[in-house]
Structure formats: structure tokens, C-alpha cells
Image (tube, grey):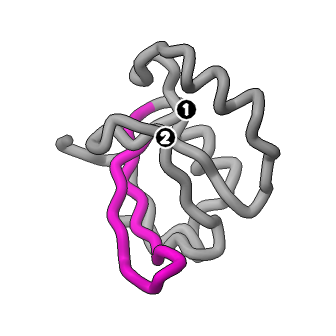
Amino acid sequence: MVNIMNTLNKDAILETLHETICKVTFTKTNGEERIMYCTLNESMIPKSEETSEVKRTKKENPDVQPVYDVKAAGWRSFRWDSVKEFTSELNV
């Protein structure tokens, strides 16, 4: 696994999320650790009215990254400052 704080930057992570499914380990606001398999690759995200509506109505926050959680089959987000690990080499 790659520790993003030491080796990757935000732009590299976003680029990878747009290419494939990634594993992001982060600390939730309640202190629990969460592992999420997510993507921003449009070909892997189901098309729906709801997702386009969410994108139009939500105010963008640079500290929070919305992603499509492939296991939960829905949009979720993580705070950039809470990410512990990131990898794109998956067997999901």
C-alpha cells in the first residue's frame, strides 16, 4: 500500500481515481477507520438522475472529496486530511 502523505499528492490520487477503482483508508469524523473501494471513472459509475442532481446542488468543498463507493453502490466522501492509505492495485 502507498501512504499518500509521503509519496502521492492530491492531483495524482484524483488522476488515479478517474482511471480505476481505488482503495482509500481514512478516519471517519467519529474516529472509526474506514476502508472504501471507490472511483471517479464515469464508465464505472451507473448513470442516474440523482447523481447529476447532487453534483449541481452541492457546494464544492476542497477539503472533502466525493467519490463513487463501488461496494455501497452510492456516492460517499472522505476528508483529504483524514486519508491514511491509498492504493490502486486491487483485486476487487
Left or right of 34 in this view: 77: right
Q: Nearer the viewer, residue 48 or 22?
A: 48
The residue under label 1 is: 18
- Give the residue at x 26% y 46%: 90
The mark nearer the N terminus, 1 or 2, is 1
Residue sitting at the far bottom: 31
In the rendered image, residue 36, in percent from the top left (x then y), is placed at 36, 55
Left or right of 33 in this view: 50: right
* Highlighted magenta segment, given as a residue range: 20-38
In the rendered image, residue 32, in percent from the top left (x then y), is placed at 38, 81
Q: Amino acid at mark 1?
A: His
Q: Amino acid at mark 2?
A: Trp
Residue 33 belongs to magenta span: yes
**Vertical position of residue 34 compared to residue 15: above or below:** below
Secondary element type, mark 1: helix
Disc on res. 75 = 2
CA neighbours of label 1 inside 10 A, class few (<14), some (14 to 19), many (20+): some
Residue sitting at the far left: 91
- Give the residue at x 50% y 26%: 41
CA neighbours of label 2 inside 10 A, class few (<14), some (14 to 19), many (20+): some
Q: Nearer the viewer, residue 35 or 5?
A: 35
**Vertical position of residue 6 compared to residue 72: above or below:** below
